[in-house]
Image (tube, grey):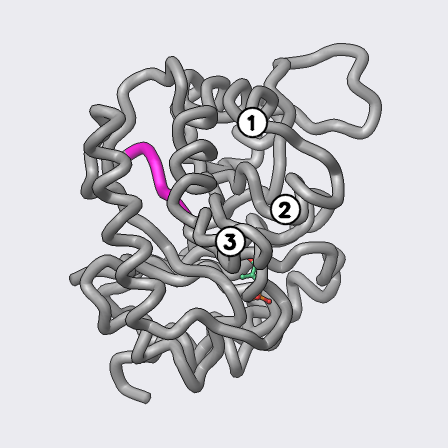
């Protein structure tokens, strides 16, 4: 089955490094069945678009504002992304929620605006360590899904991607076991059904995924792909994860 292998570069790789990464990475890339996506910083998107050329890399933004234009210093809009041919956008990454204080109501507006504009959100959800230790993981995920998806236009596997990223596993080197991640992601599908949402949305796992564990994670039924931070920053490591079937 097709999987999605996505690199979230966070605040790494300016335009020059982005161009160098894509040139090196594309040379080594053998077209396989999986969808490959990168999320460079906003200032590097134009360089990424130019460097991608005919290569099958899909391009996404890490963030966007829900208003179309106006007095919103520091923000970028959906039409600006569309002018660069960007089709995907991360929404609700734990760093946006917990460092920048983005709440469910704001994320819901962003999701709605992206869908209305015909873009595909990658909506990130995940519990913090204290939630997990208190046995509240599924309550937190349900709350994030209920708030985020409230009143959206119809979502389905062709216009929406979810990413399950346990916050305690992001950038920490601690990965959920493939079994734990798969079980939680199966529960996410049940929550989607209970919310009358298509349960077979693509769901990515994120949290210290790396070449050494990519194959075991991707072999699981409910794991439709990976959202990768640190291990997506070097072309060689990202390529190994793209080639997870062969590694
Ligand atoms: C992320 O930022 O989405 C992520 C999963 O980071 P890392 O792979 O570094 O844990």
Q: Element type at marker 1? A: helix
Task: Name the quadrant of the N terminus.
Answer: bottom left
Give the left or right position of residue 26, taking residue 154 as reference.
right
The magenta stretch spans residue 161: yes
Bin the neighbour count of mark 2 within 10 Å (Cα to Cα): few under 14, some 14-19, many 20 and up.
many
CA–CA distance in space, label 3 to label 2: 40 Å
Question: What residue would you read off at disc 3?
Answer: 134
CA–CA distance in space, label 2 to label 1: 26 Å
Q: Are marks 3 and 2 in contact (CB under 8 Å)?
A: no
Q: Is residue 193 visible?
A: yes
Percent coordinates x, y for residue 194 in the rendering: 22, 30
Q: Is residue 17 above or below residue 131?
A: below
For marks 3 and 1 on the same chain, the one whose residue lies earlier in the sequence: 1
The magenta stretch spans residue 103: no
Percent coordinates x, y for residue 246 in the rendering: 27, 86
Provide the residue span drawn in magenta.
Answer: 159-163
For marks 3 and 2 on the same chain, the one whose residue lies earlier in the sequence: 2
3 vs 1, front mark: 3
Magenta: main secondary structure equals: strand
């Amino acid at each position: 089955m097709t999987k999605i292998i996505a690199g979230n570069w966070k605040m790494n790789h300016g335009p020059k490094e982005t161009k160098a990464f894509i040139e090196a990475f594309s040379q080594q890339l053998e077209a396989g069945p999986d969808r490959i996506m990168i999320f460079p910083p906003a200032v590097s998107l134009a360089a990424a678009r130019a460097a991608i050329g005919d290569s099958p890399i899909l391009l996404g933004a890490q963030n966007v504002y829900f208003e179309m234009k106006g007095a919103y210093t520091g923000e970028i809009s959906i039409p600006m992304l569309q002018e660069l041919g960007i089709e995907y956008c991360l929404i609700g990454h734990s760093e946006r929620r917990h460092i920048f204080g983005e709440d469910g109501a704001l994320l819901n507006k962003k999701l709605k605006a992206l869908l209305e504009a015909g873009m595909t959100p990658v909506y990130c959800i995940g519990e913090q360590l204290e939630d997990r230790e208190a046995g509240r993981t599924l309550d937190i995920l349900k709350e994030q899904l209920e708030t985020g998806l409230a009143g959206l236009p119809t979502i389905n596997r062709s216009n929406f991607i979810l990413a399950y990223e346990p916050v305690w596993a992001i950038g920490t080197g601690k990965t959920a076991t493939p079994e734990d991640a798969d079980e939680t992601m199966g529960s996410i599908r049940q929550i989607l059904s209970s919310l009358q949402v298509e349960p077979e949305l693509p769901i990515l796992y994120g949290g210290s995924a790396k070449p050494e564990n990519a194959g075991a994670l991707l072999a699981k039924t409910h794991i439709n792909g990976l959202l990768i931070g640190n291990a997506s920053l070097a072309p060689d490591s990202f390529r190994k994860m793209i080639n997870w079937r062969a590694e």
